Image (cartoon, coloured by chain):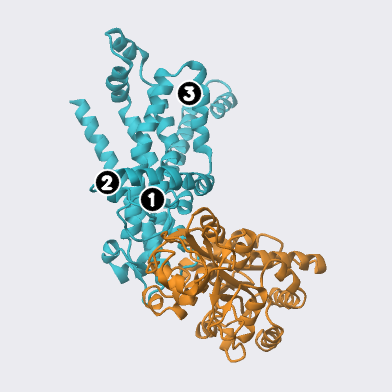
Chain colours: A orange, B cyan
Amino acid sequence: MNFIRTIVAAGMVAASTSAFAADITGAGATFPFPLYSKWADAYKKETGNGLNYQSIGSGAGIKQIQAKTVTFGASDMPLKPEQLEKDGMIQWPQAMGALVPVVNLEGVKPGELVFSGELLGDIYLGKVKKWDDPAIAKLNPKVKLPSEAITVVRRSDGSGTTFIWTDYLSKTNAEWKAKAGAGTAVEWPTGVGAKGNEGVAGNVSQTKNSIGYVEYAYAKQNKLTYGAVVNKAGKTVQPTIGAFQAAASNADWAGAKNYYVILTDQPGDASWPITGATFILMHKSATDKAAAQEAIKFFKWAFEKGDKMAEELDYIPMPDSVVKQIEKTWSAEIKS
Amino acid sequence: MAVDSDVIEAAGPYDRARALSAFKVGDVTFYWITRICAISVLLILGGIILSLIVGAWPALREYGLAFLTTQRWAPSADPPVLGALGPVYGTLITSVIAMMIAIPVGLGIAVFLTEICPLWLRRPIGLAVELLAGIPSIIYGMWGFFVLGPFLANTFQPLMINLFDGVPVLGAIFAGPPSYLSLFNASLILAIMVLPFITSISVDVFKTVPPVLKEAAYGVGCTTWEVVRNVVIPYTRVGVIGGIMLALGRALGETMAVTFIIGNSFKIQSSIFAPGTTISAAIASEFAESDGLHQSGLILLGLLLFILTFFVLAAARLMLMRLEKKAGN
């Protein structure tokens, strides 16, 4: 299996390694790609040093950093601490994003419809089949719900977005956890699969009476009707930068080993429950030490100067307390 | 050849033995170059099969033959439960529907182009067919997603669903709800994609029918239909079937366009308006984010597609051989 992995990884970076030798190379998650490229652009202008990031998916990013074909890997799903130790790597959250449920229902305005994790789970299990189901009506007494079948839309490709979504459903809906579970690709009980965030967004916006889940940025840019969600504290929250950041601040970063925190369903009155961090993975002792140092410099710069750029693209910067901790980890763990 | 004449000139006065040996060297070199080319195909094929088997081995050991008969696909279960029945079903169904549409339409276009079409219309239609073949599959996928899918879901599918509602069997095949990501939509895209293969090759082989044969048939009073049916098609059968096989091969393996529009569901449902998946779409969707047994399972799916295609093509060859034998008698 390792042999295959190496071949796949080597093939995928073949293009990137031929680029400028001075550039830092990274590969992985597609979700933070717009952010990393914007940061890289600004960083190049400021320092003259480039960054080459290939958005090929979290799983492939993990494989590449394990095979040491890139300076850093990026994943929407943190690696388990044991796995990290085994590979001699460290990881940290670099930025956060949030998912929102989106619907296409006539006459319903953004933020008007309220969901709970359990209800979303039942819809995605195919148990709640119609929009006027009592379970939906109970949470939405004021909304006029049509007696139409719900079209469930989900991702067809394996993705970190799906991991965050299914992890949230697993935490809030026991039946979902037993039947489908959490993962980048799961056994979907119902629904149609569309490719990528843009596929789900497109499908929902064109299909009447449908529901889907996308990154917040896609919902905003495509002007989709998003829903509000009841969080762990029992409060109904709207998807806002403040609510996303509250989820990050309320997470127990200090107590977590190797930053292994999955941000879904965090406590706190203001926390948006479907939030996820995107992680950077690096070897403690890299083969190319100069490139590793350069990469750390870049991520440090991104933490210090990249917040505004992140917000412009609807990503959520890591809270300062977490950043301080990450910087300590760097100086303790990365060998130069 | 240039090489030979040089050698002969350099030899000065005509020397038969030297000239012959020069020819021989050229011949032997040519023999070996072509031979190496031909053998390299076998080596490449063997390499592909070998690496597929190596990659698929863990899944093969874990699931064995049950892989073929299991419908469940749960990569996130612990341990993962993987079965190929859904994707195999989707691959076969979409290919069959695509061929059911593409063969008559493709042959129809070919017959029209070679037998009936006025001269001035030949070039535009021929060009359009060739362009159809040149469109990248991702464009087909996007067009399917944004244009064809919504059209089918909003007009064609509701019509069929209402038409066959309550009819046994057909009612189940054309069951709702309408969806613009479905097996049927993917089949239709596939049909459009493989159409040029059938048409182009058929046109080319139809042109090889000696005019004398056709003229003779017309001479004894045959209609155009009878000429096509009894002269053109029998004369070009092998070529036409070759084109169809090429198209079928493409339909079985087409990935990008299908991934966009098939809806990626591993469940087998009776309705062709329900989402499904194909082997190649499943691999393309999940490979990047897979690892361990899940990835091995996807490679095993790939191996399965390889074998499936091999058997389909082998069956076609067999059929062709039988037809030829019959025609020979």
> CA–CA distance between discs 3 and 2?
78 Å
> How far across and how far down the image is residue B269, in percent?
31, 56
As drawn, the label of residue B173 is: none
Q: Which of marks 1 and 3 is nearer the N terminus?
A: 3
> CA–CA distance between discs 1 and 3?
69 Å
Residue annotated with mark 2: B170
- In this image, B303 relative to A109: left or right? left
Is any part of residue A284 visible from this angle? Answer: no
Amino acid type, residue under disc 1 in the picture: Leu
Which is more foreground, mark 3 or mark 2? 2
Contact (Cβ within 8 Å) of mark 1 with mark 2 = no
- Above or below, comparing residue B278 to residue A273 in the picture: above
Q: Quadrant of the N terminus of chain A?
A: bottom left
Amino acid type, residue under disc 2 in the picture: Leu
Residue annotated with mark 1: B183
Disc 2 is attached to a residue of which chain?
A: B
